[in-house]
Each structure stands twice: as structure tokens, then as C-alpha cells.
Image (tube, rainbow, N blue to C red):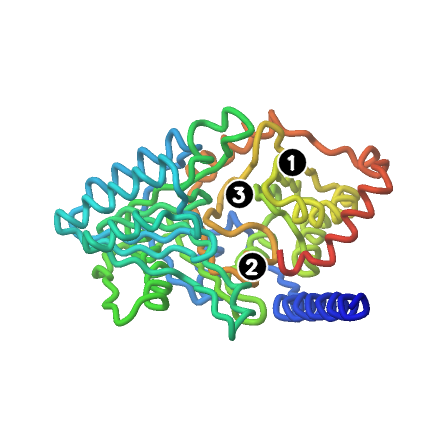
């Protein structure tokens, strides 16, 4: 009997190792991308150059409102939902039980009852805690609700592919995206360790229509048959200093347009590169891009979450690369008050990017994500305002002190770095 139990244990371990190996193979970055930009971010030709390389449609005539933390984010989003007259498109990774979820459930339900088309997509794993009573109410009111990536026993590898997009578009003209889901942890103003620091951006103008296009990609995939709704394009061409493009990612077994966007953005930096991202895990492509930026003399600052994180193994994996980055002169800051969840990048104070993607392999190789890239100095300045404010309550890592951390810490980081591809 003991021999049988031992044999079952061995079989279980082998199966688990095989599964992990398979997931690593699926996630592996097969090619190191080395991209140089023909133009600097401040060059008037850079937005058009980037759009052409990525096959993205660029548009002008947009305005942006940066919303900092739940106190600003949720009232603005709910006001838009409550003002909807024709259509609401909403996609999220997290839709959980709590006061925030209840408020949005009531708002979606009320909108549907007054005749608004309400289309929702939630990730089946990230939103697994959504109460069944809510989904019943929404569907009874006429809401079309799709669940992305429902687990199937015969396609276990599909568990690795999630929608991490955060999208709200109302009447095809007002859009929101960033890092926030529907959960009470985003309430307030990052006032304590239980309430996260995060950012959403309200986009008004033609780009909202393109954001809704990204929503419709997964709306089609999760529900059928459906008739996606897209408004007629407004006649507002992009200009060098007024250009926005929407770039999506989805599993492709290799690099995608969103990853190339990140690498092009880094390559366009000539003076400053400011990155804010939780779960900051580099690969060979981003390592090369960041090293090249430093060789050009670019000041690189990276703001990440600290020990207050919801994913310790990912944190350890990311820290494994810190010494190499610090030795290159890259400044790394760990946010201290609570979990830092903002995803934003600003290049030379002229060009910026925000959305749902983290600076890690999961966002750039596995998840369905969406980012907005913008040439607008006012927006860049506003994002930098929050960045500088957050640096004041972050710990700047010292290369010499970091080198002296304990053997246990180094071993733990080294171990988890082997799983960085599937985090």
C-alpha cells in the first residue's frame, strides 16, 4: 500500500512538471526582438511611423482626463453609465461581490431597462466570484453578458489565456481604460494598505470608437450570434501633436503588436523614460531595449509595487533582474503605502501610453490586453504629475545595498524567475 501511494505521488509530480513545462513552452518568447526607432518620440513623424509599423489606425480630436484612484474613477464611470442613451460596452477581468460591484450592477440593470443596449464581457476566472444573483438580474433586464475563457477539461492550456482588458465605452463617444476592475479594493484614495493605488483615463472623441472595437473582439468570441455595433467614423484626422492609436494583444504563440509598441516606445526615448507598472518582469527583448536606452544617455525611471503585492512569486521573479538594471543606471522605485497597480509610460514628456497591460510576459504574450498610445504633451504632463507624486512615497533602491540582500532572498528570486514566462 505504501509503495502504491509513493508511486501515485511520483506520477502526480511528473504530471505537474509536464504541465508546467507545457505552459512554459506556450509562453516562451521564441525570438529576441531588437527594435530601433527611426524617429524620436518628440519628432512629428513618430506617431505616423509607429501607426504604420503596427498597422494601427491613428485619430485626432480627442480629450483626456486622468482619474486617480477610486474616489475619482468610480463616480466618473458611473456617471457615464447613468447618462447612456444608446449603448454601453464594458469588459473587465475582475467583477467581484461588494459595494462597487453592486453599484455597477444596478447601473447596468437600470440602463438596460430604459432601453440602452448593454453588452458586458467578464473573464471567467478573474470574475469567478460575481454573485449568480447579479448575473440573473442583468440577463433578466436584457443585458448581454459573456464569460471569456470558460474552462474546458479537454483544453487545459486555455486556462493560461485570459482577458485582462478594462474597457468601458458609452454611446461610442466616451471611453475609459486603465487598471481598475470592479472590486472594493479600489475604493477610496489609496489611503491604506487595503485600498490600491491605480489610474484610469477617460477618453472623449474618435478614439472611444476604436476602444469599443477592442471590446467587440471579445464580445464576438464569448457570445454568438451577436451583431457588433460600431458608430460611423468622425472626420478628424490625426496630427503630429494630436494622435491616438489603440493597440491590442491576444495570444499568438509569439510576440504581438502591443509588445512591439512597448519596444518602439523605449527605442524612441532620447532624454527620459518613465515607466509605472506592477508585476515588472523583463525578458531578453525588453532587457535589450532598456540597455540601449541607457547607452543613448536616457534617464530611465521605473516605479513598481513593493512588498505590498497580491502576487509575491511574480514580485520575486521581477526582482531577480533588479541588480542588472540598477548597475546600468536605471532607477527603480518601489511604492510603499499600498499595492501600486497603475500602468503608464511617458517618453520625453511628449508621448505616453496607458491601458490594461503590465510590463511583463503575461500581458505582452498571453493575455488579451489593450493600450492607448497618445501624442499629447498635456496628457504626458498630467501623467508625470502623478508619477512624481508617487515617487515621493516610494523607496529608491540603492545598487550597493541591493547587492547585500540575503542569500535566501537571492535564492528565492532566482527560483521564481524560472516561472516568469507564465506569470
Q: Are marks 2 and 3 in contact (CB under 8 Å)?
A: no
Return the x and y of residue 148 as percentages of the image width and height.
41, 62
Return the residue found at the far bottom. Answer: 154
Report how far apart the C-alphas of labels 1 and 2 lie in the structure: 22 Å
Say which quadrant the N terminus sits in: bottom right
- Give the number of the mark in front: 1 or 2: 1
Residue that label 2 marks: 364
- Give the number of the mark in front: 2 or 3: 2
Return the x and y of residue 331 as percentages of the image width and height.
69, 38
Q: Quadrant of residue 248?
A: bottom left
- In the rendered image of this protein, does residue 161 appear above or below residue 129? below
Say which quadrant the C terminus sits in: bottom right
Q: Residue at x 57, y 44 (%)?
A: 277
Confirm whether residue 249 shows in the render.
Answer: yes
Numbered disc 3: secondary structure: strand
Comes first in the chain, label 1 or label 3:
1
- In the rendered image of this protein, does residue 328 appear above or below residue 123? above
Q: Which mark is residue 306?
A: 1
Report how far apart the C-alphas of labels 2 and 3 lie in the structure: 18 Å
Q: Residues within 10 Å of mark 3 (few under 14, many from 20)?
A: many
In front: 129, or 160?
129
Return the residue found at the far left. Answer: 114
Q: Residue at x 49, y 60 (%)?
A: 162
Q: Which mark is residue 346?
A: 3
Comes first in the chain, label 2 or label 3:
3
Numbered disc 1: secondary structure: loop
Q: Are marks 1 and 3 in contact (CB under 8 Å)?
A: no
Amino acid at each position: 500500500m505504501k509503495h502504491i501511494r509513493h508511486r501515485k505521488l511520483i506520477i502526480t509530480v511528473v504530471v505537474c512538471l509536464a504541465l508546467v513545462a507545457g505552459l512554459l513552452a506556450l509562453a516562451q518568447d521564441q525570438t529576441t526582438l531588437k527594435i530601433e526607432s527611426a524617429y524620436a518620440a518628440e519628432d512629428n513623424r513618430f506617431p505616423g511611423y509607429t501607426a504604420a509599423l503596427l498597422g494601427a489606425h491613428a485619430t485626432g480630436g480627442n480629450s483626456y482626463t486622468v482619474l486617480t484612484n477610486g474616489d475619482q474613477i468610480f463616480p466618473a464611470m458611473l456617471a457615464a453609465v447613468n447618462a447612456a442613451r444608446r449603448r454601453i460596452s464594458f469588459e473587465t477581468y475582475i467583477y467581484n461581490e461588494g459595494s462597487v460591484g453592486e453599484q455597477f450592477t444596478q447601473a447596468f440593470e437600470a440602463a438596460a431597462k430604459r432601453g440602452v443596449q448593454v453588452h458586458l464581457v467578464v473573464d471567467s476566472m478573474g470574475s469567478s466570484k460575481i454573485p449568480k444573483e447579479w448575473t440573473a438580474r442583468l440577463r433578466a433586464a436584457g443585458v448581454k453578458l459573456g464569460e471569456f475563457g470558460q474552462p474546458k477539461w479537454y483544453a487545459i492550456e486555455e486556462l493560461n489565456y485570459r482577458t485582462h482588458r478594462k474597457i468601458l465605452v458609452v454611446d461610442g463617444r466616451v471611453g475609459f481604460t486603465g487598471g481598475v476592475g470592479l472590486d472594493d479594493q479600489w475604493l477610496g484614495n489609496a489611503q491604506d494598505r487595503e485600498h490600491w493605488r491605480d489610474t484610469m483615463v477617460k477618453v472623449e472623441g474618435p478614439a472611444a470608437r476604436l476602444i469599443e472595437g477592442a471590446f467587440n473582439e471579445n464580445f464576438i468570441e464569448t457570445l454568438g450570434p451577436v451583431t457588433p455595433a460600431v458608430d460611423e467614423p468622425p472626420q478628424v484626422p490625426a496630427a503630429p501633436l494630436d494622435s491616438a492609436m489603440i493597440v491590442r494583444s491576444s495570444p499568438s504563440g509569439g510576440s504581438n503588436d502591443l509588445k512591439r509598441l512597448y519596444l518602439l516606445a523605449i527605442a524612441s526615448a532620447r532624454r527620459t523614460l518613465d515607466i509605472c507598472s506592477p508585476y515588472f518582469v523583463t525578458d531578453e527583448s525588453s532587457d535589450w531595449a532598456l540597455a540601449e536606452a541607457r547607452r543613448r544617455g536616457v534617464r530611465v525611471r521605473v516605479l513598481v509595487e513593493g512588498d505590498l503585492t497580491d502576487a509575491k512569486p511574480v514580485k520575486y521573479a521581477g526582482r531577480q533582474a533588479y541588480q542588472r538594471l540598477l548597475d546600468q543606471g536605471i532607477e527603480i522605485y518601489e511604492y510603499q503605502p499600498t499595492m501600486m497597480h497603475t500602468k503608464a509610460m511617458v517618453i520625453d514628456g511628449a508621448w505616453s501610453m496607458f491601458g490594461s497591460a503590465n510590463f511583463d510576459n503575461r500581458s505582452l504574450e498571453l493575455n488579451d490586453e489593450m493600450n492607448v498610445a497618445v501624442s499629447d504633451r498635456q496628457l504626458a504632463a498630467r501623467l508625470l504629475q502623478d508619477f512624481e507624486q508617487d515617487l515621493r512615497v516610494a523607496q529608491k533602491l540603492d545598487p550597493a545595498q541591493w547587492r547585500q540582500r540575503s542569500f535566501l532572498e537571492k535564492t528565492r528570486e532566482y527560483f521564481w524567475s524560472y516561472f516568469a514566462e507564465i506569470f
